Amino acid sequence: MCAWSADVPVGRSFAWTSCFAVGGWGGVVMLAISVRLVAEIRRLRTVEGWRIHTIARHLGLHHSTVKRALERAGCTGARPRRRASMLDPFEDFVRVTLQRFPRLPASVLHEMLVRRGYRGGPDYFRHRLLELGLRPRRTPEAFLTLKTLPGEQAQVDWAHFGARKVQGGIRRLMAFVMVLSYSRWIFLRFFWDERLPSFLAGHVEAFRFFGGVPRAALYDNLKSAVLEREGDAIRFHPRMLEMVDHYGLDPRPVAPARGNEKGRVERAIRYVRTSFFPLRRTWSLETLNRAAPEWCRQVAGRRLWPQDRRRTVEQAYREELGFLRSLPEDFPAHEEIVVQAGKSPWVRFDANRYSIPHDRIRRPLVVHAEPERVRVFDRGELVAEHERSWDKGQLVETADHVEALKREKRKARLHRQQERLLLAAPGAETLLREMGARQQSLRTAVDRLSWLLDEAGPEELSTAIDEAISAGSPHPDTVRLILDRRRRQRRQPPPVPVRIPDDPRLHKLVVRSHDLAGYDPEEDV
């Protein structure tokens, strides 16, 4: 209560009293301030422009005492004279800009002014916007507490846990979170991306974890689910529609920028960030996904249920489980793309290469990719299967593919050697045919005859092969003995081996020597 002391003369030290009901004489303690102090309060307010709390702090008074003193002095509603501000020259620019762009953030507007010469800080700038009425305060919005029936609804969202280094690059660690709206039972699964195949795989595993399917699911406007949205007109991804049709699920995207409509999954994500993830000192995608189901049951399931603090979330989930619809067969959530291998027996998928049989190159193939496996099909036939790599720039091979390619390369090399041999010494074909009739190794024969071709030349080798066949001994060793005998008869030294670079073009090269008889004989000088 307050009372004005009209009986006190003006010249006396007390002009009025301000009373506080804090006990004491008569139940009230009377506190009076002097006329001089009242004048000082009015001066600081109207002349210096101090705030009420600033005056109270510096004069050692309660703010209510200062306020009543101003009211008694006739200063009610009086606005102090404002001092000049650095924003004054820019006020017209700010007004025009906010009229054109009413939702422009204050931070962006402050940067625009800084580029135009404004030197004030961002906090003072926001304060001045409110003082001038250029940025009115938003009226707080009230929300209703929504209650759902058991088994009626689930809420779904992605949570980003930062960019993580993998071998060969960086990937985004994402958490797929689904919450049953009635019981607040949480499902948590980590992925290396937020693309549609991972989104669908999260649904499949979540329904398997819940033991049933709710009737509806609330989504944010995720690119994984919603391709286009114009107001209430929504175009879902075709694969998303296949999934909801398979499970009989009613997809319900919330309104844009209305995260409160799916607040239960938002709070669940915040709970994952504060309760689950900080405890993982050493982690990988596999260890996170092994620990997540146990955490959902043992930790998140033991929370108190918000609708009845005498029960736990797990008890509410046991009640809701009977209202979930029965679980059908798992939806095929794999990613399917068409690829084509070039000259090398590998197909590229998701920044890595996966081996295929060498006879499947240069044709369209279909890759079926799941979070754990990558399968390659050729016209419906499974030709390769690999464990999926989430690194980047890696070559994932199967030993059978590599060995088959090596065998094919050795066979091709044998064909190239045989072709070169027959081109240089046509009689070698008869020798090899007779060796095959005697069940002798043709590969060894081709290797040895090719070595003798490099050592002696095509003419000598052809002569030696013909003599070996005439002698009834078609064998590379016989050819070598004949070449040695002919070299000794010519009194030539043993041949010196020549190291030829491992270049396929050189191995296929055949050099024929020319007859020098046509050249002019050397004249005596």
Image (cartoon, rainbow, N blue to C red):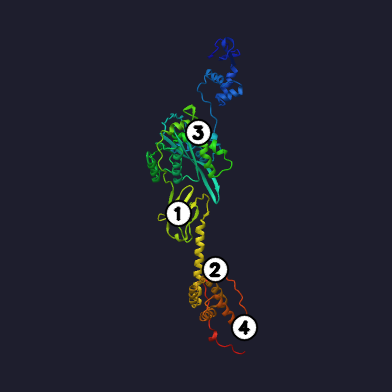
Q: Which residue matches tag 2?
A: 503
Mark seen at residue 491: 4
- Element type at mark 3: helix
Q: Which residue matches tag 3?
A: 301
Determine crowd level at label 1: few under 14, some 14-19, many 20+ residues with C-alpha closer than 10 A: many
- Position of residue 490 measured from the top left corner of the image (x, y, whole percent): 60, 84
Say which of 416 and 2 sits in front: 416
Q: Residue furthest front?
A: 438
Q: Residue furthest bottom?
A: 524
Mark seen at residue 322: none
Q: Which residue matches tag 1?
A: 376
Residue at 45% x, 43% y is 199
N-terminal of the pair, mark 2 or mark 3, is: 3
**Of the two numbered discs 2 and 1 in the rendering, the one whose residue sits closer to the viewer:** 1
- Position of residue 364 measured from the top left corner of the image (x, y, whole percent): 42, 57
Determine crowd level at label 3: few under 14, some 14-19, many 20+ residues with C-alpha closer than 10 A: many
Marks 4 and 3, how far apart in space? 97 Å
Kind of residue sitting beneath label 1: Val
Kind of residue sitting beneath label 2: Asp
Q: Is residue 257 left or right of residue 501?
A: left
